Image: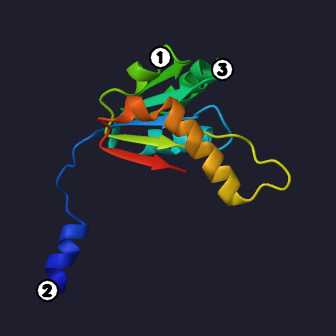
Amino acid sequence: MIRSATSRIFSSSRRSMSTVAVVGSAGGIGQPLAMLMKLNPLVSDLRLYDVVPLNKGVAADVSHIATPAKCTGYVGDDEILEGLSGCDMVIVPAGVPRKPGMTRDDLFNGDWSLFILHLEPETQYVLRLVNI
């Protein structure tokens, strides 16, 4: 029983590669998250999206990490659909900065309302959506 459980954990079979998007990749959480996703061997296509124009530079920097995953940057409302279409997972660390007196609930509710307004229509066919 133990042998079969450990053999599944340490299986050498190849898992399928994934297309992952990070929305808010130019921010303080999004940049290191994008780097970690680029290093993940299960990611074959990494798409970085943000409203900030310097996101193309973030994508260029992340693409220099020596892994087989392809990394592409997307900026603005015109490119959001292209960046999110066909993704297996979308990770959303984007949001408004925390202001003095705000609780975490206030921050989450504000960020979630931004998500509903801007991203929900584009993510209707995404398999997994993670809001950080």
The residue at 61%/38% (across/down) is 31
Which residue type does callout 3 highlight? Leu
Task: Return the residue nearer the eye: 128 or 105.
Answer: 105
Residue 54 visible somewhere in the drawing: yes
Which residue type does callout 1 highlight? Glu
The residue identified by callout 1 is: 79
Place residue 113 in its image quadrant: top right
Place residue 11 in its image quadrant: bottom left
Mark 3 and mark 2: Cα distance apart in space = 53 Å
* Crowd rating for badge 1 (residues with CA inside 10 Å; few <14, some 14–19, many 20+): some
Mark 2 and mark 1: Cα distance apart in space = 50 Å
The residue identified by callout 2 is: 1
Q: For numbered disc 2, what is the local secondary structure?
A: loop
The residue at 33%/34% (across/down) is 87
**In the rendering, at what x and y percent does residue 4 appear?**
14, 78
The residue identified by callout 3 is: 54
Which residue type does callout 2 highlight? Met
Task: Return the residue nearer the eye: 125 or 20.
Answer: 125
